[in-house]
Amino acid sequence: GLKVRVFAPGIISLKNRYEYSISFSANGKECCFGVTNSNWSWCDIYYLKQDEQGNWTSPQKAYFQKGYDGWLPFFSPKGNRFYFSSGRDAKSVNIYVCEKNNNRWGDPLKLAPPVSGPSWEWRPTTTVDGKLFFMSNRDSGPQGGDIYFALPKGKGFDRVTNLGSPVNSEALEASPF
């Protein structure tokens, strides 16, 4: 019974663009996904949610987008954090987080060191117990990317650790989810 079908044609999946990295909130009532073009010259994050009657809103650019700088959205399993990658500081690509308070998403904040730094950190995903997994090109092999994890500490993270072999190799590892 498995059959490949286009997801939400005419709503999320539109012609002449690429959609990628869809993420749903823990309660299934919010959705974010990435949008780009055929040569990946820009990227946006789109957001939609269910209203009180169970109807989905139309997808809109996420409120925190600044130009074409949002990639790889991810809702935390507990539903209180939303992560994405961005190059908005123009020096590197880092992971940003928005926290939900009183049923509203706050402004994005760049994760502090040791997660963020001069290297590229992207493709964030978290576990139920708050561990952050992500791809980075810090001190990695010749292909430029390994998967790392960081342990939660307060509102941030502590101790970034390379997963090592057999997860990481001399090739590029890029999608921890």
Image (cartoon, rainbow, N blue to C red):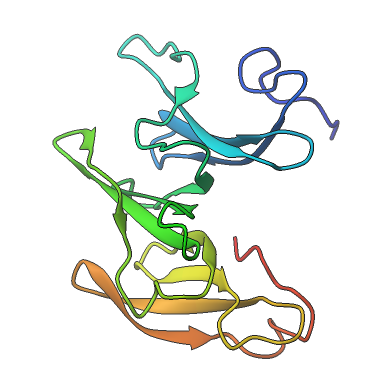
Residue at left offset 62%, top offset 39%: 42
Residue at the extreme left of the image, as rendered = 102
Q: Say whether residue 174 is left or right of residue 106.
A: right
Could you tell whether 26 is left or right of 139 in the image? left
Residue situated furthest front in the rendering: 90
Viewer-proximal residue, 130 or 168? 168
Q: If the image is split into quadrants, where does the C terminus sit?
A: bottom right
Say above or below: 11 vs 138.
above
Work out whether residue 160 or residue 91 is closer to the camera in this orientation and state it.
91
Residue 147: percent from the left, percent from the top?
60, 76
Residue 43 in the image: x percent, y percent? 59, 40
Q: In this view, does 116 lie above or below 23?
A: below
Residue name at image x 49 percent, y 65 percent:
92
Q: How many labels does the image show?
A: 0
Pinpoint residue 95: horizontal percent, then vertical percent: 43, 60
Could you say which is closer to the camera, residue 26 or residue 119?
A: 119
Residue 11 vs residue 113, the one in the foreground: 113
Hey, which quadrant is residue 33 in on the image?
top right
Residue 79 is situated, as x and y percent measured from the top left of the image, at 33, 46
Q: In which quarter of the image is residue 115?
A: bottom left
Q: In this view, does 16 lie to the left or right of 87?
A: right
Position of the N terminus, as image quadrant, is top right
